[in-house]
Amino acid sequence: MAKTSGKTSSNPRGRRPTAGGAKRNAPSPLTTLFGGLKDLMKVNFDNRRIPTLIGLALAACSLFACLALITFLFSGGSDQSLIYAARDGEAAAELGREAKNILGLPGARLADYLFNQLFGWGIVFALSYVVYLFAHLIWRPRIAPYRYITSFLINGFLLLWVSVAAAGLQSLFPSDSFLRWGGLRGEELFTYIYRGIGIAGLLGVLAFTLLIFAVTCSSRVLSAIQNPKVPKVPHVSVPRPQVGGFFSRLFSRKKKNEEPQSEEEDESYSQDEDAWRDEPPMPTDDEDMDVQEEDPTPYVVHTPPTTTTATTAHPVEAAPSATSFSRTTTSEPSDVPEMIVEEAPKDDLVEDGDRTAPEPLAPGIQLALYRKPTIDLLRDYEQGGTGIDMEEIEYNKQKIIDTLASFKMNVTPCKATVGPTVTLYEVIPESGIKVSRIKTMEDDIAMSLKSEGVRIIAPMPGLGTIGIEVPNSTPQTVSMRSILASRKYREQQEKMELPIGIGKTITNEPFIFDLTKMPHLLIAGATGQGKSVGLNALITSLLYSKRPEELKFVMVDPKMLEFSIYEEIERHFLAKLPDAERAIITDMTKVVATLNSLCIEMDNRYRLLQTAGRAVRNIREYNEQVRSGALKRIDGHEILPYIVLIVDEFADLMMTVGKEVEQPIARLAQKARAAGIHMVIATQRPSTDVITGLIKANFPARIAFKVFSMVDSRTVLDSPGANQLIGRGDMLFYQGKDMIRVQCAFMDTPETEAIVEYIAQQESTGSAYELPEYIPEGEENGAKGFNPNEKDSLFDEVARMVVQTQVGSTSNIQRKFNIGYNRAGRLMDQLEGAGIVGVQEGSKPREVYIKDQATLEQLLQKLS
């Protein structure tokens, strides 16, 4: 029973354990897996396998990075163009070239990223921390964790400090290197600190942060700061009297304690002591020069013969070497060509004469009391202009050099011309560099300078340089007064027929051209870029240079607001159709009739020039003949004014009228030059359906303000460039040759109102210049009615002359009866309505239906 009870206590149910029970108590496979991994990890950590593997991986990374960086630093930037080949669109050509980096193209990209894009020379401390990590993981795994944090903080501080200091050194001593000494991040941190507290604050931050770092890491620096050692003045040995044995023994013991000093130190100390004791008073500059010329060795030290050559010869020879080094250092910049910075010349203004005095009038001038507007009506916006910002010029120059050098295009700056809104940097590329490659760097330079509107002229016309136009950070406003009051405009005013001063070039010179030499002008630009201001400047320039007898405007204003300010000078300078209520055309349905009327005016002028003789080939020669008296008024010859057609928004005109307006514009563009009719067409949508090929072919002179796409620029200028402008009056002038960048003069509305009011108070011709009446084709063949109540007083005499000569010509009537063209045209219409002459057939004379005077007299009796 005892045994049974014992078994029962160990196994209450009296059963033997079975295999199924053992299986139920066994651990799961997942638990077994994690347990095995835990044991494996413990074993690997115990034998330091995992730290060693991590350290070897870090060692491989640091080795590859060091190799890539070393070969990158000694590659001379040859791999830069290969790195950025894809962005230049030359990937196929560049990728075929082998990289000089020892790790190939990936190594070059890695090194460029680590050095140029991160922290420059500071990346050395990042690599040193990686070396510290793998060295301690492999050979010193039991180091305390805080040591890694301490090393990270030390290397991190040195990385940032060296990066900022290197970026500052590179800004102070610019170089053509492809390397960014401080890296992109260092340059950004340097720029942030520099803009905030300036160069003095930056130097203070660098100095004190380094001092704090040294105090934190070094006990010697800490003790030196806490207990500074002030240098003592050298002791002068004076003979002492024998005062007693005690004092003599005391002094002798002190001398014995000082005996361990070397002989050389004693000699140098005695030399300094003698020099301090025998030092003469400080001479003046003149006395110092005399002393140096008389005795080149100011101090002579008597030393033993063995040390004379070692002590005296060294300082004497060192002084000239130091002088020559300083001279070499100062003369080194002269070896590198310096960039010449030229400020644009100041305005050479001419005092406005007394406009109230009578002007010497040429023959044929009718308005003897008319006075041209004065310069006092215009404002001067350039009085607050700033000078040259040398820091900005140096910064832009270095950025241009560095950007081109990063693509292995080394250039040498030679000149910078500062204009009112744009600075022109001229550079000379090294031999072997394609100019076409530099031409494609506009966007890269603009991104580097953080500026828009960078334009490259490659090459400069007539020069062996490449021009890079960079907008100024503080542009100046060009006033219309500085243009019209300039000496250049006054000189060109007498030489040109229609002088137009519209702005200033990048060299601050007034830009003046003759509209008669263009002979027509196309202006394009996006909304708000200065197109309307340019038109007002053009009109103002002509108003200041011409009299009402010499110039007339035909203005087409689809906006209905731009030219409405000029309505007050309708009796002076505007032209219109006979039945038009307003001289400024705002109704688009009347534009076609006006343009065709100008075509009729052109044909009439050509017939008039033809009858004037072979010596007259254009309106200028015709007016000279009239003024000289060779062509007389009695024969129907009068001074013909120039007619300038100005269309503000041609795109709206094309959308409204369509192709009907293209034919008369093409006719005027082809033939109207010699007749004195010129066109200025402006549009804000320079697309091919607006500026057609027929119009472009007859508008060789074009002005492009800023547009927003290269396609629009090519439509206007046949080349890109207008999309690179900065707006606000920045424009390109093109006349079949090289493009000229001009800053348009600013004209405010009060200035225009003052000019218009001044002209409106002057003597006028009494009415606007009447253009010939235009009859549409549908009404041209219809018979004109004859109203006896509207019959002209000269009707009978003109009818007899036409029947007698059998010539039905308006110009013939004009010459024979010494009347104007408009009256002669109305007489011809009355003759047609009476059945005396036939309808007009182009430029041919009308057919005369009545052949004898008797039939004519009978008809005249019936009409009366």
Image (cartoon, rainbow, N blue to C red):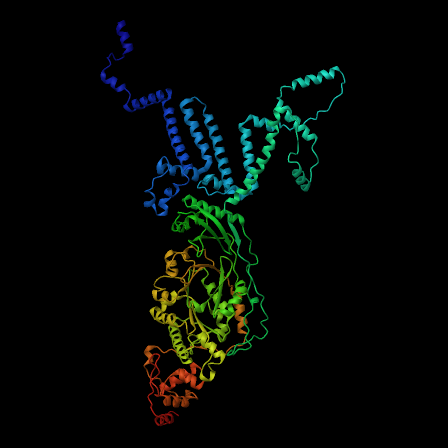
Residue 69 makes an appearance in the image: yes
Residue situated in front as seen by the camera: 766 or 60: 60
User: How far across and down, in percent of the image, does residue 401 sit?
Assistant: 46, 46
> Please, is residue 202 above or below residue 643 in the view?
above
Q: Is residue 754 left or right of residue 830?
A: right
Q: Quadrant of residue 621?
A: bottom left
User: How far across and down, in percent of the image, does residue 169 sit?
Assistant: 51, 40
Residue situated in front as seen by the camera: 633 or 564: 633
Image quadrant holding the N terminus, namely: top left
Residue situated in front as seen by the camera: 754 or 242: 242
Residue at 48% in and 42% down: 175
Q: Going by the picture, which residue comes out furthest to the top?
A: 2
Q: Going by the picture, which residue comes out furthest to the left?
A: 19
Q: Quadrant of residue 758?
A: bottom right
Residue situated in front as seen by the camera: 582 or 490: 490
User: How far across and down, in percent of the image, does residue 676 sit?
Assistant: 43, 73
> Please, is residue 767 above or below residue 344 in the view?
below
> Please, is residue 332 above or below residue 549 in the view?
above
User: How far across and down, in percent of the image, does residue 836 sit?
Assistant: 35, 88
Residue 560 makes an appearance in the image: no
